């Protein structure tokens, strides 16, 4: 089960400590970080928070638009890789069959 959440639309000043302090209300946090641009050394305005248990992650995402540092952020469960819809998978499979 997924215990990691994606938090987007952060201000460029929001840091990992702020994410920890905001999401601590939902449960124990194992890790929290903001993603930075390597060249500019500036936030890309999104980050991730990993909780100890699934219930805490689900509670954190009950409000999909929390206000963090004065800005309406977006919050949802994080997935590894891009989520694909069944339609895209069928089209891809069909395309392979035609190209043979």
Image (spheres, rainbow, N blue to C red):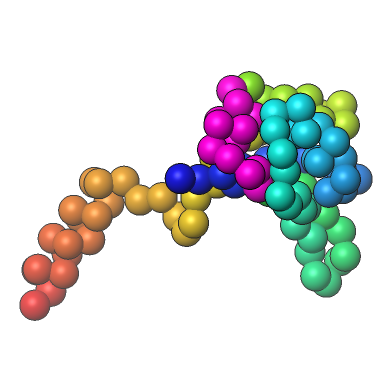
Give the image location of residue 25, x and y in percent. Answer: 76, 27
Nearest the viewer among 20 and 14 is: 20
- Residue at image position (86%, 66%) is 40
Nearest the viewer among 35 and 44 is: 35
Give the image location of residue 62, x and y in percent. Answer: 59, 23
Can you see residue 29?
yes
Residue 3 appears left or right of 89 = right
Total numbered circles:
0
Residue 20 appears left or right of 58 = right
In the picture shown, does residue 42 fall above or below 49?
Answer: below
Q: Which residues are magenta?
A: 50-62
Nearest the viewer among 64 and 94 is: 64
- Residue at image position (79%, 64%) is 37
- Residue at image position (55%, 31%) is 55
Q: Residue furthest bottom?
A: 100
Does the magenta portion include 78? no
Split into 4 quadrants, where in the image is the C terminus? bottom left
Give the image location of residue 18, x and y in percent. Answer: 87, 40
Give the image location of residue 21, x and y in percent. Answer: 85, 36
- Residue at image position (27%, 51%) is 88
Can you see residue 8?
no
The part of the image, by quadrant, that contains residue 20 is top right
Residue 86 appears left or right of 29 = left
Does the magenta portion include 60? yes
Residue 8 appears left or right of 86 = right
The part of the image, by quadrant, that contains residue 82 is bottom left
Q: Residue furthest top?
A: 63
Split into 4 quadrants, where in the image is the N terminus? top left
């Amino acid at each position: 089960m997924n215990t990691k959440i994606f938090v987007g639309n952060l201000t460029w000043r929001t840091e990992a400590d702020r994410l920890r302090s905001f999401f601590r209300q939902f449960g124990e946090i194992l890790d929290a970080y903001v993603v930075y641009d390597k060249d500019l050394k500036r936030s890309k305005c999104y980050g991730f928070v990993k909780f100890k248990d699934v219930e805490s992650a689900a509670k954190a995402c009950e409000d999909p638009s929390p206000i963090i540092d004065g800005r309406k952020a977006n919050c949802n469960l994080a997935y590894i890789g891009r989520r694909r819809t069944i339609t895209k998978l069928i089209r891809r499979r069909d395309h392979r069959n035609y190209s043979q």
